[in-house]
């Protein structure tokens, strides 16, 4: 862990500009601050390569996992366990579609954009429940 941190710092120094990687927290909630049920908050995260996303099990019964076909080419997916906090460091630029498996059909989804990549044309082409698709579209509409 210390070693990883030191390597990260060395890399950040080498790269000069964007300095330190950030940790961005995402809450998994039964009810969002806008009253919507079964949400990730925030539902859209703009990150930089090397940033860490920390999924906080703020309400019970949720997890966070990537969807096959909704991660950048060459990136590794992840799958957290129900009720468990997980942290994932995203090094590959692109768009990551994240769902809560038990509530996918209820639209518990979020999008992470890493770097400046464009939304892939086929990002929403897979089998996605209607409510989830609507929320993905709303998340992407901001960009
Ligand atoms: Cu959930």
Image (cartoon, grey):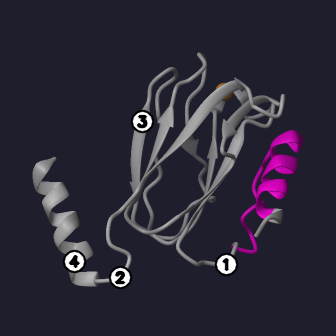
Q: Residue 134 at what x, y percent from top left?
A: 88, 49
Between circles 4 and 1, the one closer to the viewer is 4
CB-based contact (under 8 Å), mark 2 and mark 4: no
Rendered view: 52 above or below 120: above
Residue lying at 76% horizontally and 70% vertically, measured from the top left: 143
Q: Is residue 32 left or right of residue 57?
A: right
As drawn, which residue projects farthest toward the left? 3
The image position of residue 82, as x and y in percent, is: 52, 22
Mark 1 Cα within 10 Å, few/some/many (few <14, many 20+)?
A: few
The reply to whether the residue tagged 2 has its Cβ within 8 angstroms of ligand 1 is no
Q: Which mark is residue 118?
A: 1
Q: Which element is circle 3 on?
A: strand
Q: Is residue 124 above or below residue 108?
A: below
Residue 86 circle label = 3
How many discs appear? Answer: 4
First in sequence, mark 1 or 2: give its number: 2
The image quadrant where one finds ligand 1 is top right
C-alpha gap between disc 3 and disc 2 = 28 Å
Secondary structure of residue under mark 4: helix
User: For residue 138, which quarter of the picture?
Assistant: bottom right
Q: Indicate which label's residue lies in the foreground, 1 or 2.
A: 2
Which residue is located at x 76 percent, y 32 percent?
A: 33
Task: Give the residues drawn in magenta, as a range.
Answer: 120-140
In what element is the residue under mark 2? loop
Can the viewer see residue 73?
yes
The quarter of the displayed image where residue 51 is located: bottom left
Residue wearing tag 2: 17
Q: Give the Cα distance between marks 1 and 3.
A: 26 Å
């Amino acid at each position: 862990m210390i070693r990883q941190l030191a390597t990260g710092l060395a890399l950040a120094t080498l790269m000069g500009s964007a300095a330190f990687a950030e940790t961005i927290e995402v809450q998994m909630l039964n009810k969002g601050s806008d009253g919507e049920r079964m949400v990730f908050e925030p539902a859209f995260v703009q990150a930089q390569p090397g940033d860490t996303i920390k999924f906080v099990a703020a309400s019970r019964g949720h997890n966070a996992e990537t969807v096959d076909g909704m991660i950048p080419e060459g990136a590794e997916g992840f799958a957290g366990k129900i009720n468990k906090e997980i942290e994932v460091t995203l090094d590959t630029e692109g768009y990551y579609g994240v769902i809560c498996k038990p509530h996918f059909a209820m639209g518990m989804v979020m999008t992470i954009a890493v770097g400046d990549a464009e939304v892939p044309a086929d990002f929403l082409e897979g089998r996605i429940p209607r409510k989830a698709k609507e929320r993905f579209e709303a998340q992407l509409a901001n960009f």
